Amino acid sequence: MNQQVLQSKKDQVQEIINSIKESGSVTVVSYQGLTVAELQELRRTLAKDETTMTVYKNTLVRRALEEGEFASLGDLLNGPNGFVFSKDLSKGPKALVKFARRHDALVVKGGLAEGKVLDASGVKEIAKLPDKNGLIAMFLSCLNAPITKFAATMQAIADKSAPAAN
């Protein structure tokens, strides 16, 4: 085999490993049956969520998964696959599940989330999670609730005792 070709394949494997490490989630999808226009629509939808979809040869991905100790994900690598890399844990899966509802040809096969291998139902569960900003808002409302209740109680006591003083 030509040394340039071999080096190119090694570089692609390293690129895949780096993409997996930098991503909060990686989703494997089958896009067979989607038209070019639908694929472009999917890529634009994913780009809005700071997520990318890339197509690699399954053998190169399998080799990268073995080096990254995710060999069990290799079972999903049959047929043409797209690999969706998302920095945020739920943005990529959420966009894919939403797109798959409208386009039956897109099939979510499974993926990785924070180093754990997931099947298709696991990816769909992750899609139900709120994004980072939603989680922060929920956390802050939990922190704010006791203070708000305390302030309302103190105001009620003040309102109740104010008429008695007159």
Image: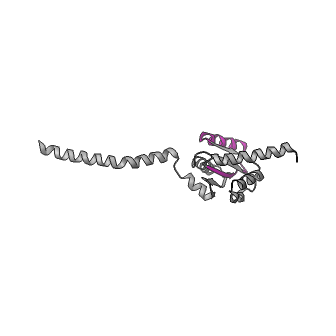
The percent coordinates of residue 141 (x first, y second) are 40, 47
The percent coordinates of residue 3 (x first, y second) are 86, 44
Residue reaching furthest right?
A: 1
In-image side of 143 versus 115 (left or right): left
Q: How many marks?
A: 0
Q: Looking at the rendering, in which quadrant would you find the C terminus? A: top left
Residue 125 visible? The answer is yes
In-image side of 11 versus 97 (left or right): right
**Foreground pick, 122 / 8:** 8
Q: Is residue 109 above or below residue 160?
A: below
Looking at the rendering, the stretch of residues picked out in magenta corresponds to 25-50
Seen at 76% across and 44% down, the residue is 11
Q: Is residue 136 above or below residue 111?
A: above
Seen at 42% across and 46% down, the residue is 140
In-image side of 110 versus 128 (left or right): right
Q: Is residue 44 above or below residue 97?
A: above
Tell me, yes or no, whether the highlighted magenta stretch contains residue 51: no
The percent coordinates of residue 58 (x first, y second) are 76, 52
Residue reaching furthest left?
A: 166
The percent coordinates of residue 32 (x first, y second) are 73, 51
**Foreground pick, 39 / 152:** 152
Q: How is the image coloured?
A: one colour
Seen at 36% across and 48% down, the residue is 145
